[in-house]
Amino acid sequence: MMYVFFGIAVVMWLGIAATLIVSPGSLRDLWHAFRTVPLLVQGIGWLLLLPWMGAVWLWQVSWPVWLRLTLIAGLAWVNLVMFYPRPA
């Protein structure tokens, strides 16, 4: 079961990376669409998808691109290390 969660995390990070490469504006659009849903739905989204929502939020802030990419890469690395399956 641990491998399934790790695989899902990898796929989601690859999806964010592909979106950043192919269409970086899509993440900004995703952020604005997410902000229009009711607060309860936003709270559940943040709770269930915290690292990925953090990456989407980081992409839409007005910081330099190199800083945003560094922070998103660091967030992805920490998240994948935490999800990496370890023997019992």
Image (spheres, rainbow, N blue to C red):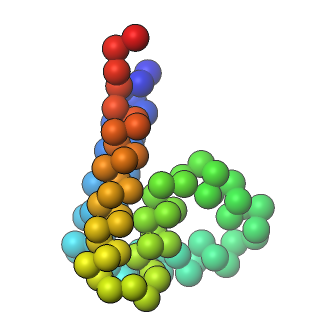
Quadrant of image for the C terminus: top left
Quadrant of image for the N terminus: top left
Q: Residue at x 64, y 76 (%)?
A: 35
Where does residue 53 sit, x and y in percent of width and height?
51, 62
Q: Is residue 63 left or right of residue 33?
A: left
Q: Residue at x 31, y 76 (%)?
A: 67
Count all numbered tags in the image, as a single digit: 0
Quarter of the image for residue 7 reads top left
Residue, far left: 21
Where does residue 51 sit, x and y in percent of width and height?
48, 55
Q: For residue 65, say whether it is visible.
A: yes
Image: 35 above or below 73: below
Q: Residue at x 32, y 86 (%)?
A: 64
Where does residue 13 sit, x and y in percent of width and height?
33, 54
Quarter of the image for residue 65 reads bottom left
Residue closest to the eye, 81 or 41: 81
Image: 32 above or below 87: below
Image: 88 above or below 2: above
Q: For residue 11, say whether it is visible.
A: no
Quarter of the image for residue 73 reads bottom left
Residue closest to the eye, 12 or 50: 50
Q: Residue at x 62, y 57 (%)?
A: 45
Q: Is residue 13 left or right of residue 58?
A: left
Where does residue 56 sit, x and y in percent of width and height?
45, 69
